[in-house]
Image (cartoon, rainbow, N blue to C red):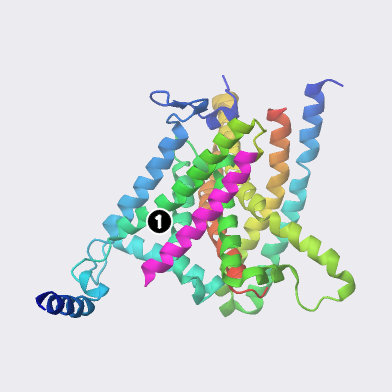
């Protein structure tokens, strides 16, 4: 198999990790909304934790995107 | 007509070529935007702290808001022992924030979209936190890797896992910021290319998505700076107060 | 006789001057001066560590290991120095 085709296939497989990122972000926001519905007055205090959790989950998915870009453009 | 979407990350030389032996030290567009960010921070915060009137002007309000924000962030996560580290965390947060925000302007260059910049920032944070931990607790700092309440059988495995996760901190910190900036700007260029290539008939759909994406990228710029700073505070908390 | 009295007077006068009186009229360092002092310490330590590693690498001809080792040493020394001088400034 030539290098170009292998690069495309490798990059395509590497981006599948973003599915995990999507599920994780949905999980975090859904649990925040559930907690906020039960206890609205305490919801504002947990907002920084929500942003932190969202960024950490997104980062793990983006690691896969970085691997895909490296495969495509650096080899 | 669509150029390479990765061409925006190219670092080129501005001005004369300064070489030290075989090392190229010339002034690049990356250095130019670092200088612009630092100057903007200095000017804004200098103007904001000149007169302290009780009814603040707009710049003074901005300065006080940023100060309170970072101060609250430090005292919430790391306690009162971390107050001497406020200038460091403040400079780090403001530098990353301004670099990200200046990258959102058209025709500019995002400094933090290169792994070497974010890696050096994360590396110095990691080394600083480790050295502060060793200076404050001596070799007792290594107790960080032994969480309490672990049965002795599992102890070697737990220690190895904890050490690996500690050593992966600078890598995750740097790659998080780098990947967010890289992915965001690449997507903006790719969708911009779609607008042009679909022409006036079908170009409205990528255009509306580009508008939404730009808004998202401004949010991500602020969020990534905040996450970088708050993770630094959490690591500092681990070093200063040894309990997990 | 006069020499002895002069000497004793000199000793008494010397013991009255404490080090703190000499610095009474000096103003506290400005914040930009303090910032420059701390940042120069860190940058200088890292730069000197790397340069020493580079020179040693050239004489011994080994691969970039010496540069890396001395870079780490420079970072460590710089951070320790910044820590200590920041502690002194806070007093």
Q: Which residues are magenta?
A: C66-91
| Left or right: where B60 falls relative to B72 | left
Q: Position of residue A58 (x, y in %)?
A: 67, 53
Please give the chain letter of the residue carrying mark 1.
C
Q: Quadrant of the C terminus of chain A?
A: top right
Mark 1 lies on residue: C38
Front residue of this view, candidates B217 and C50: C50
Please tell me whether residue B143 is drawn above or below residue B107 in the rendered image.
below
Q: Residue at x 45, y 47 (%)?
A: C43
- Judge by depth and name the residue closer to the eye, A1 or C36: C36
Residue C78 shown in magenta: yes
SS at badge 1:
helix
| Quarter-of-image position of residue B206 | top right
Residue B168 seen by the camera:
yes
Q: Position of residue C13 (x, y in %)?
A: 17, 77
Query: In this view of the protein, which residue sits in the foreground, B205 or B92?
Result: B92
């Amino acid at each position: 198999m030539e290098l170009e085709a292998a690069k495309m296939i490798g990059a395509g497989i590497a981006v599948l990790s973003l599915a995990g990122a999507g599920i994780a972000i949905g999980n975090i926001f859904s649990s925040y909304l559930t907690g906020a519905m039960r206890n609205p007055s305490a919801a504002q205090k947990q907002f920084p934790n929500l942003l932190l959790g969202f960024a950490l989950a997104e980062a793990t998915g983006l690691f896969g995107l970085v691997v895909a870009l490296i495969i495509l453009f650096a080899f | 007509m669509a150029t390479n979407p990765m061409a925006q990350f190219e670092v080129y030389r501005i001005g004369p070529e300064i070489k030290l032996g075989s090392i190229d030290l010339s002034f690049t567009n990356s250095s130019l935007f670092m200088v612009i960010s630092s100057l903007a921070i200095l000017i804004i915060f200098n103007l904001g702290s000149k007169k302290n009137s009780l009814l603040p002007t707009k710049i003074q309000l901005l300065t006080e808001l940023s100060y309170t924000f970072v101060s609250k962030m430090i005292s919430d996560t790391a306690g009162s022992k971390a107050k001497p580290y406020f200038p460091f965390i403040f400079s780090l947060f403001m530098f990353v924030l301004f670099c990200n925000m200046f990258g959102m302007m058209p025709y500019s260059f995002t400094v933090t979209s290169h792994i070497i910049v974010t890696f050096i920032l994360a590396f110095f944070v990691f080394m600083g936190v480790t050295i502060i931990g060793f200076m404050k607790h001596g070799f007792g700092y290594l107790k960080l890797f032994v969480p309490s309440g672990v049965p002795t059988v599992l102890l070697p495995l737990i220690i190895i896992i904890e050490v690996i996760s500690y050593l992966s901190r600078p890598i995750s910190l740097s790659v998080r910021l780098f990947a967010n900036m890289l992915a965001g700007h690449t997507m903006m260029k790719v969708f911009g290319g779609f607008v042009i290539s679909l022409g006036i008939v079908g170009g409205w759909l990528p255009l509306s998505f580009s508008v939404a994406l730009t808004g998202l990228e401004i949010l991500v710029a602020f969020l990534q700076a905040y996450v970088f700073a708050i993770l630094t505070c959490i690591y500092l908390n681990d070093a200063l107060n040894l309990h997990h | 006789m006069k020499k002895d009295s002069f000497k004793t007077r000199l000793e008494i006068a010397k013991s009255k001057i404490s080090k703190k009186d000499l610095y009474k009229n000096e103003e506290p360092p400005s914040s930009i001066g303090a910032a420059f002092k701390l940042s120069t310490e860190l940058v200088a330590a890292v730069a000197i560590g790397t340069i020493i590693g580079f020179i040693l690498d050239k004489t011994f001809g080994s691969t970039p290991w010496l540069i890396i080792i001395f870079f780490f040493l420079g970072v460590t020394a710089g951070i320790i120095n910044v820590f200590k001088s920041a502690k002194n400034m806070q007093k």
